[in-house]
Amino acid sequence: MGEIRTLKNFVNGKWVGSETKTFEDVLNPATEEVVARVPISTKKELDEAVEIASEAFQLWSNTAVPKRARILFKFQQLLMENKEDLARLITIENGKAYSEALGEVQRGIENVEFAAGAPSLTMGDSLSSIATDVEATNYRYPIGVVGGISPFNFPMMVPCWMFPMAIACGNTFILKPSERTPLLTEKLAELFKEAGLPDGVFQIVNGAHDVVNGILEHPEIQAVSFVGSEPVGKYVYQKGSENLKRVQALTGAKNHTIVLNDADLDETIRNVIAAAYGSAGERCMAASVVAVEEGIYDAFMEQLASEAKQLKMGNGLDEEVFLGPVIRKEHQQKTFDYIQKGVDEGATLVLDGREGIPSEGYFVGPTIFTDVTPEMTIWKEELFAPVLCVVKVKNLAAGVELANKSVFANGACLFTNSANAIRYFRENIDAGMLGVNLGVPAPMAFFPFSGWKSSFYGTLHANGKDGVEFYTHKKVVTARYATKDFK
Ligand code: NAD
């Protein structure tokens, strides 16, 4: 094995070694191999990046919007050309199956495509006559330096919810990627620079708590986009708001799926399996609880257990593999503890993911519990692992009532052929992202994305027009003209 590479920070368009004494190993969770070392940078290094970002803002915010957009078009083209390499990197550092990584890269690219529409997206509005000879125009402006803090589970897609739009709007951006999956962002920075982005507009400061606190405290940082777990998101929202920043914090989840008697069984099982076990359940949109109507329950359970058992586990780079590892050994152990807790609290373990796993890598097999109640830990908490809880319900109303008991409200899905049921579900369920006859209501660049309740802190969601709103502020000019006769 060759020497292990130490990652650098991307500051002012250059790769700069960190002065920190603390480093963490970046592991391939399928092989337990150390693939790099990431610096846990200091607050001082963050402060230096902010100073550069503030300076770069003067130039970038005054760069014509179509010129900014042209750099994003070029960036999009380079991302397309490097799609396979990017996906491979994601599988290596995160563990998800290559096909899923490729899907993630595609979602990220769509964010860049959407942001390249900045000339239309950032247009203001005007009214030629708000009073006699008086008109008003609303202009949009960038807000300044923006900080982004991202999680380990989508190393490409989640940062792409943030920086392409922030930068297209004329802001400068500092990203603190997850210290567990920092490799992909390195590639994003290189390609963005190659696309012609001026130095200092996009920077990466690797690290953990100190860099996050630096972002939340620095007076020059105007807005913070956070995606990660609920306790950290709440902290980021509270501390960032206290320091008078705009904050959007997309947090944890416990997504409910409801299956009605009239659902297409084969299609439902295929979708539920992909939603519960895809990316090893490490998705904020993963199916965690399935409420199944009485009439279809037995058939559903039989087919679910039989198909889940057959899922191929292993290294995601093997194209036949569906289920990769979870991110770290600690997370594997925590999941095993949750499984034991489920058993101890009285749920029925139908399929035990602690059994039949490879000896190398942090694997958890597909797990199924039935007889789960809302009092149980496995029902209440986000497990972020391939563990599915199944509950038998009397009808749709009971399924919705159960789902609404959760403190989380990120996504919810319904499988049915009934238009009336779909409408009832839409009007009564608490969740920001709904799926009908599909398992993962995935975030799309063009629509706002986020949950409700404890799954989100803030006002403006990520993506879509909410993204433009979040990364800009407005100025309304009211102007009076003299009535003149030019004849
Ligand atoms: P995490 O909260 O552990 O980490 C997220 C980021 O916060 C990382 O960059 C990390 O370095 C930083 N961080 C962690 N602890 C911190 C602390 N005490 N102080 C300051 N910074 C800290 O989350 P994760 O494990 O990387 O990601 C998984 C979580 O992210 C899950 O809860 C998942 O639901 C959530 N997630 C949510 C969405 C969404 O759209 N709602 C999308 C993806 C992931």
Image: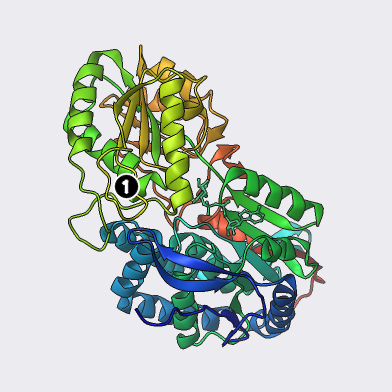
Drawn side of residue 95 relative to residue 227, left or right: left
Residue type at tag 1: Gly
Can see residue 260? yes
Residue labelled with disc 1: 278
For the C terminus, the quadrant is bottom right
State the SS at label 1.
Answer: helix
Give 26 or 85, whichever is nearer the viewer: 26
The residue under the point 36% across, 70% down is 89
Q: Residue at x 62, y 74 (%)?
A: 170
Estimate the x, y position of residue 58 in percent, counting from the top left: 72, 83
In depth, the one of 3 and 299 nearer the eye is: 3
In the picture, measured across the screen, residue 386 lies left or right of residue 196, that is left
Q: Residue at x 35, y 66 (%)?
A: 92
The picture places residue 433, in percent across and down from the top left corner, at: 46, 41
Residue 348 place in picture, x, y as percent = 34, 20
Classify the position of the N terminus by image quarter: bottom left
Q: Is mark 1 within 8 Å of ligand 1?
A: no
Position of 402 with respect to 353 (left or right) is: right
